[in-house]
Image: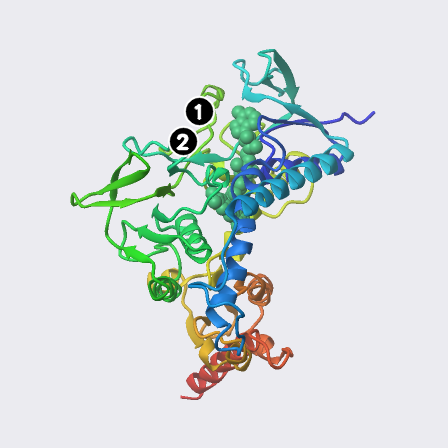
Amino acid sequence: MVDVTRIVIIGGGPGGYEAALVAAQLGAEVTVVDRDGLGGSAVLTDCVPSKTLIATAEVMTGFDSSYQELGITLACAAERAISVDLGKVNRRVKRLAIAQSHDITQSVTRSGVTILRGTGRLGPGGQAVDGSREVLVEESDGTVRSLRADAVLIATGAHPRELPDARPDGERILTWTQVYDLDELPRELIVVGSGVTGAEFAGAYQALGSKVTLVSSRDRVLPGEDPDAAEVLEDVFRRRGMNVMSRARAEAVKRVGDRVEVTLGDGTVISGTHCLMAVGSIPNTADMGLEEAGVKLNDWGQVQVDRVSRTSAPGVYAAGDCTGVFMLASVAAMQGRIAMYHALGDAVQPLNLKTVSSNVFTDPEIATVGYTAADVSCGKMDAVEVKLPLRGNPRAKMQGIRDGFVKLFCRPGTGIVVGGVVVAPRASELIHSISLAVDNNLTVEQVASAFTVYPSVSGSTAEAARQLHIRKRAESES
Ligand SMILES: Cc1cc2nc3c(=O)[nH]c(=O)nc-3n(C[C@H](O)[C@H](O)[C@H](O)COP(=O)(O)OP(=O)(O)OC[C@H]3O[C@@H](n4cnc5c(N)ncnc54)[C@H](O)[C@@H]3O)c2cc1C
């Protein structure tokens, strides 16, 4: 008789539920312990709700920014052609999130996985003689259950970081998980933090009609992204009327009646009707018995893992935001699947972050894959680049798109494509051809020779590849 491997997964976000599906397919006996609902923060509070809100914002900016140029006239002459019912938008956001969590619960249950609602932690006993570990599950009525597992996956995600002098109150001072309870559009919104989350919300609320101030402690918005892309976005934000405050660190946020006041490092006080805090996140790893079980955490409390998701404790794996490896739902899911392939003895390819594609859902969107300009400038990768502004793309001209570009990086000798950036509406859809090239070591010649539709924005990707090919040929001839 073949022994069935018992897998217990703590956390039912993309890291946890995708792992559960794979483990069940591989024949394991799988239990997922989750305290908030399957889909995790990704589905219930973060990724899915923000992108649903942004879907409304996207239609509004698309219309606002091009209708006059495209020859559309309006029957009424209101100050702004279109407006939003935020209560209705937020009800839609929550409905879709709950429906998606429900769909995931159904498919995980159908695959034979047991789902337990409760808070999980590793038991105090360490590894038993048979190699198994104990997981304790506290249910909502206080009952504590003990489960035994041959392998445990920690996939508990993260939660919004709070500053000591800027505590969210859920009404005027908000985290990104609280904004969906608003019934009315914030008139004057101050967004603290100009990373991906801050930039996405700042752009979305501006499109919906809020007057937005973006407080950035760095020189420019999106400090972790391609500098040319960040420059385009910051320029677009400012042109649309956003007050982008650079090198301005928020020290404190307080409520004053129906308003909020944000005090900056230099003592300046700015005032608005609402403040959204987007200052990073904290891994959900406290009080879980991890260090007692030999699971090493770094100084930020993130679980240390290798490229097959193993922690420092035998039989304990970790995936997703609690590891801080690359805080994306797609990476969490991949880490979770890899953990299960490894734990269950299936063929496993270690995580390769250089093929991850990611997107900033602003308008324009910024999509990136592979090696970056920073990797090239610090000498980590020897590559040449070409950047084609969308201004020259026929489809973009027809659609009234002026901002954005396609950038490709390739190795100087072989012409192998190692990275790319697309700044455009729907860049998240356009990056895939570059992802395929990076993942399969395609050369610029191969990318250039594939047909693209005329006219299309993706024609710029092929054109960038052609230009790199010509440059490579000229260099080899000289
Ligand atoms: C505003 C925002 C927008 C984002 N947009 C995108 C996007 O567009 N694309 C993208 O790829 N990524 C996006 N992300 C990142 C993405 O949401 C995360 O990378 C993803 O949620 C990580 O998945 P996870 O499985 O690690 O954790 P989570 O999705 O956080 O799930 C963890 C689950 O574990 C549960 N849990 C925690 N502790 C315990 C415990 N002790 N016992 C039981 N259960 C527990 C939690 O309740 C939760 O259900 C966004 C993030 C934010 C903040």
Report x, y in % for residue 368.
48, 61
Q: Are marks 2 and 1 in contact (CB under 8 Å)?
A: yes
The amino acid type, in three-letter code, at marker 1 is Ala
The answer to which of 215 and 242 lies nearer the viewer is 242
Q: Residues within 10 Å of mark 2 (few under 14, many from 20)?
A: some
Q: For this view, does 269 lie left or right of residue 61? A: left
Residue 444 location, quadrant: bottom right
Q: Label 1, on which residue?
A: 286
Q: Which mark is residue 113?
A: none
The colour mode here is rainbow
Report x, y in % for residue 297.
42, 30
Q: Residues within 10 Å of mark 1 (few under 14, many from 20)?
A: few
Specify the quadrant that holds the N terminus.
top right
The answer to which of 442 and 19 lies nearer the viewer is 19
The amino acid type, in three-letter code, at marker 2 is Gly
Spatial separation of the CA atoms under disc 2 and disc 1: 8 Å
Q: Is residue 237 placed above or below 111 in the rendered structure?
A: below
Q: Label 2, on which residue?
A: 301
Q: For this view, does 100 lie left or right of residue 379? A: right
Residue 452 location, quadrant: bottom right
Q: For this view, does 225 lie left or right of residue 322? A: left
At mark 2, the secondary structure is loop
Residue 420 appears anywhere in the view: no
Report x, y in % for residue 66.
49, 72
Residue 174 location, quadrant: top left
